[in-house]
Image (cartoon, coloured by chain):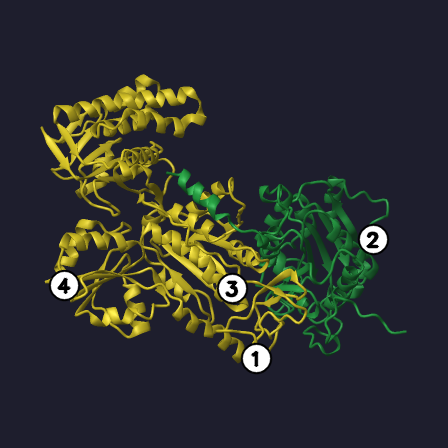
Amino acid sequence: MIERKNMFSLENEKELDIAWCPGCGNFGILNILKKALEEMEEITPNNFVLVSGIGQAAKIPHYFKNNAFNGLHGRTLPVAFAIKATNPDLYVVAESGDGDMYGEGGNHFIHNMRRNINITNIVHDNRVYGLTKGQASPTSQQGMVTPVQVNGVILNPFNPIAVAIANGATFVARAFVGDMQNTKEIIKKAIRHNGYALIDLFQPCVTFNKINTYAWFNEHTYKLREDYDPSDKMQALQIAFQEDKIPLGIIYEEKGKPTFEEQLTIYKQNKDPLFKRSIDLNKLESFINSMR
Amino acid sequence: MNKTIKEDVSIVLSGEAGQGIQTIEGLLTFILKREGYYVFATKEYMSRIRGGSNSTEIRVSSKPVKSYVDKIDILIPLTKSSVEHLGDRVTEDTLIIADNDFLKLENKNLFNVPILSIAKEIGNEIYANIVAVGVILGLFKTNIKTIEEYLKERFGDKGEKIVSDNLKAASEGYKLGKDFSESGEIKIEISANESLKDDLLISGTDAVALGALAGNCDSIFSYPMTPGSGVLVDLANFSKNFDILVEQAEDEIAAINMAIGGWYAGARSMVTTSDGGFALMEEGLSLAGMIESPIVIHLAQRPAPATGLPTRTAQEGLNLVIHAGHGEFPRLVFSPGSLEQAFYLTQKAFNIADKYQIPVFVLTDQFFVDSYYNVKKLDLSKIENKKYFVETTEDYKRYDLSKAKNGVSPRGIPNYGNGLVVVDSDEHDEEGHITEDLDIRIKMVEKRLKKFEALKEDFISPEFYGNDNYKYLVVCWGSNYNVVKEALENINNKDLAMLHFSQVYPIPENAVEFLEKAEKIIDVENNATGQFAKLIRAETGIKIDSKILKFNGMPFSVEELTAKIREELQ
């Protein structure tokens, strides 16, 4: 049987010079995302934009066949926000590492969830800086020894789930690349969620993080029960602080909250993306004349 | 005391922040313009919300006035410290109209007018500013109907009581002003011209914001920073009538990345900021250079470094915008000198940015954005906006070298056509994918830099003013246009001319002939090091030795520039 090629695969997929180490969790995310996208009939490489920042995770758009914006370190979200805001017809996924999203881009992380722009934010969380050779990331465990944190990390780890829930994010999930099936379903639900969706996606760095390995994640995570109710905010917050066993799944989901773009006057009468519009110079002329 | 002021009067109102000085500026300039006068207004203010000493200068004239003067013919101080604040500008010739029961000033040119008492009688000290407006309008013997109409327009939505109180305050003041005029104590003789009442009266901020609209700007992303934020506020107001997406970003870094994201999706986006805000945007500028994204950046300069003098004026941002961003890539910098130029060049900025896929700056400054004067017309008949992005085909490559003209490859946007659009801040191949192939690197650098050549053919010529057979050439840029012009009119020397650059980078090709023809070039700039003179030298090899530089945070006044240019002629 000939395996059908995924429509999001580049023609030269086999020869691609992929920059990740063998065994890197990014490979899994790449495959899962591709499968998820292909299973979503509404999405094509044309109406989909993958936006990333800088880092190993941020290279992901280059191994995909779709529209892509690989921007600056930490600046994934402002770009993704503006693409969606100026053309709401596009499906936008913002994808980068924990350093990019929570460290360098922390301010954007906070404020874009306040905007509730309808994008999906997938954070490759390996709890270490891989591309720069193993320094601590915002999610690194306390005590982890690195080339910079030589006596162990002192800082308290950033809790993206709790921050997101507290900050008004309308879809907050955690996934682990080792759990492909669930991760794929979470991604699909996140993309279909109307509003900002965060997936903090565990992904082992096989080279620089010797603590949070595949085995470690397997041992320290569990799937949320099927009857778990993600609409209960206080329960979700409680779960967000669980450290011994980390829950995987949709931890919090708020439905029906209007998105940023739904609240914009410019789309109330006219659904056209901005690139299709032009200023009416006659109207501008009378407007200027009314200022006399 | 009898005093007659002819042709051109400079009125200064000064008080604390919060005393309504800006309201006075708005009311007086618009009412006087409607009465058929040429007006000019500019303010200077401290970086605080309440207190301090701020002032606004309003020039009213029978001929066009567009620049700042030191002289104060009539001063209306609302606080005791106002007079001291204005320093040497208050001379023996300055008439002071003040409520001296409260201010207790000592000055032989003082006219005691119960401004505050009247305001209190009406019900609130806050009306003092409106009483002052009335006094001035009385001196001009303005039609009281114009005042009524304007107050209704301005305060109408605040309710009848507010309108009638304001009207009462204005007419009480008006009577007093008119008395001075009729008794001959203060006589203002400026001829009004009916045809001026339909002039536009706009600020530099308005000119930039309207120009952006005319350039089909459909989105603005910015973080507020004085003096650049006015454009954000203007466009937010215009968004009630036009389809503009206005978003206040969490910081400047977000703002510029948003604007670039907007252009990627086909929207015409801009940011507005000041030097310090732009400093944060530098990496985003570099990103625009690398991915060949258009972007329009309005930067209103103020004194620096760091936070500098937040509310004052300067031309210190030129080096910044020219050198900002790491790496080598093309850009263009406009620096309008007049409100009309600000309108047309901002409109053009969007098309140039789009055409060449480069960052285009509109570089103004605090003095420029905060100044108002009569503008006859903003002509929209010749305006053309072309959207330069293309509908893509399946084989589309964002950085196609074979299809690049002057280094410009056709720019596709997502979901418009069958192609895919990939852009990358890393060095990239023709498809936009990351590469470390050093041969492609060379081709991409050359492609990007090639745009410089094309830009040289599409430049805005510097404006020459004066006698063709000049010996002395005053070189200036940006907001010094009008003050240099007025100084030259005062000096009236046939050997003297002005060359004003509204495109400061790249230096327009034809500038060299003008510069080489002069026996002596005099550079006028609001900075301490002559940044533009250095740029001219770097780009053309022409060295300018005479420099008139001012960097105390205030604009050049006509008088001081007239004197300083005269010195250079000796």
Q: Are marks 2 and 1 in contact (CB under 8 Å)?
A: no
Q: Do the residues bearing badges 1 and 3 touch, measured as CB atoms within 8 Å?
A: no
| 1 and 3 marks on the same chain | yes
| Residue at figure coordinates x 32%, y 45% from the top left | B375
Is there CB contact under 8 Å for labels 3 and 4? no
Residue B255: percent from left, percent from top: 52, 53
Earlier-in-chain disc, 1 versus 4 = 1
Chain drawn yellow, letter? Answer: B
Give, as a three-letter code, the residue at label 3: Ala
A176 with respect to B435 (left or right): right
- Shade of chain A as shown in the rendered figure: green
Residue matched to label 4: B495
Q: Chain of mark 3?
A: B
B95 with respect to B201 (left or right): left
Say which chain tag 2 marks: A
In the rendered structure, the residue with mark 1 lies on which chain?
B
- Separation of residues labelled 3 and 4 (CA atoms): 45 Å
Residue B7: quarter of image: top left
Identify the disc placed on residue B288: 3
Which residue is identified by label 2? A223
Asked if the residue at tag 4 contacts the one at tag 1, i.e. Cβ–Cβ closer than 8 Å, the answer is no
C-alpha distance separating marks 4 and 2: 86 Å
Viewer-closest of B89 and A167: B89
Give percent across and percent down for residue A112.
61, 49
- What crowding class fits label 4: few (fewer than 14 Cα within 10 Å), some (14-19), or many (20 or more)? some
Amino acid type of the residue tagged 4 in the rendering = Asp
For mark 4, name the chain. B
Instruction: Report the disc number at residue B440.
Output: 1
Which quadrant: the C terminus of chain B? bottom left
